[in-house]
Amino acid sequence: MASVPVKERVRVSQNWRLGRCREGILLKWRCSQMPWMQLEGDALYISQANFILAYQFRPDGASLNRRPLGVFAGHDEDVCHFVLANSHIISAGGDGKIGVHKIHSTFTVKYSAHEQEVNCVDCRGGIIVSGSRDRTAKVWPLASGRLGQCLHTIQTEDRVWSIAISPVLSSFVTGTACCGHFSPLRIWDLNSGQLMTHLGSDFPPGAGVLDVMYESPSTLLSCGYDTYVRYWDLRASVRKCVMEWEEPHDSTLYCLQTDGNHLLATGSSYYGVVRLWDRRQRACLHPCVLPALHHQASLRCTVLRPPRPGLSEAVTGPPGLWAREASYSGTPPPGGCRDTSAPAVPVLLDLSPQCLGTVR
């Protein structure tokens, strides 16, 4: 921090406050798909229809090689969601199946997991959890000799939109549509499959939780159809969140990401807007409007890129924000299906000091 000239710190601070950055479209397709992506080391993993593609970064760190580093297939319908864990890719498909792919080999296994599409999946410590439109959440082992053997089936009474395993592997949380059950956030015991508690109260019908993530064993973040990001601390209360941020334009929040410190990034349902939030204040720092096909373009996935070597995170904030854009062919019903009929665009917002002086 002390090695950065004062003038440079002031310039970066002003550009960060005003939301100035450099943006660029990395890849673009015209086929229908359910967009999702994950960043792992020097590779970006992106779903395209029923495939998952891995792209290598070029040395400049701001562009990708056009030829995929790897292609992971196996689903009969679109990939709805996937995670990277233990050198594996765990994918959830619209065909009701879960796919297990080894990143560094051709090993691929898929098995029938649910009666309808699998909307979400997570994996930690050799355990897979999945959630589906069929109103169930299930627990599976990752061990090669036990793939496809269901450990627990949980009746959620609602479509499961999001799911996450606790870092200590004792429980997992489901985010549901909030149509058949009064609480869209419930925590389940990972070993027994029994309900431990539900979070919050007085949720309106249809206030489904579209994304949820643990920050620590006792803290988690959620967002969804009711336009709020909520921060929960299980040590303080399970009935009331300790902090919440409201999307100012009343847009559904499809996804969220955090840098593990003060920064939050959310993807909105209209106009391709990524909002950056400082958790120490109520209002968002600045909205970043990405190149959109039309006014109903939505952000389905955001990824915060770690600091690059030699950059001071305290000065620059996050060096890069990746956002995945899709668009609707019609207005989605509350708590209803995600539309997958339009192309998706991965966009890089570079927030590093070298780029923060560039006005869009």
Image (cartoon, helix red, strand yellow):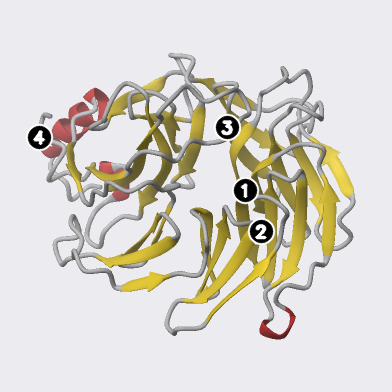
Q: Nearer the viewer, mark 3 or mark 1?
A: 3
Residue extending furthest toward the front? 76
Separation of residues labelled 2 and 3 (CA atoms):
19 Å
| Element marked by disc 2 | loop
- The span from disc 2 to disc 4 (Cα, nearest Å) is 39 Å
Mark 2 lies on residue: 167
Query: Quadrant of residue 342 in the image?
Result: top left
Q: CA distance from mark 3 to mark 1?
A: 12 Å
Question: Measured from the top left, where is residue 276 in percent x and y?
Answer: 38, 31
Q: Are marks 4 and 1 in contact (CB under 8 Å)?
A: no
The residue to which callout 3 is attached is 223
Which residue corresponds to the image point at 66% horizontal and 83% vertical from the top-left? 144
Residue 275 visible in the current orientation = yes
Given contact means CB atoms under 8 Å apart, are the residues at marks 3 and 1 in contact? no
Q: Amino acid at mark 1?
A: Tyr
What is the CA distance from the residue labelled 4 to the residue labelled 3? 31 Å
Alpha carbons under labels 1 and 2: distance apart = 7 Å
The residue depicted at 60 percent of the width and 21 percent of the height is: 226
The answer to whether the residues at label 1 and label 2 have Cβ atoms under 8 Å apart is yes
According to the image, label 4 marks what residue?
358
In this rendering, would 166 be left or right of 37? right
The residue identified by callout 1 is: 214
Say what secondary structure mark 4 lies in. Answer: loop
| Disc ID at residue 119 | none
Q: Residue at x 79, y 22 (%)?
A: 201
- Quote the CA–CA distance across marks 4 and 1: 34 Å
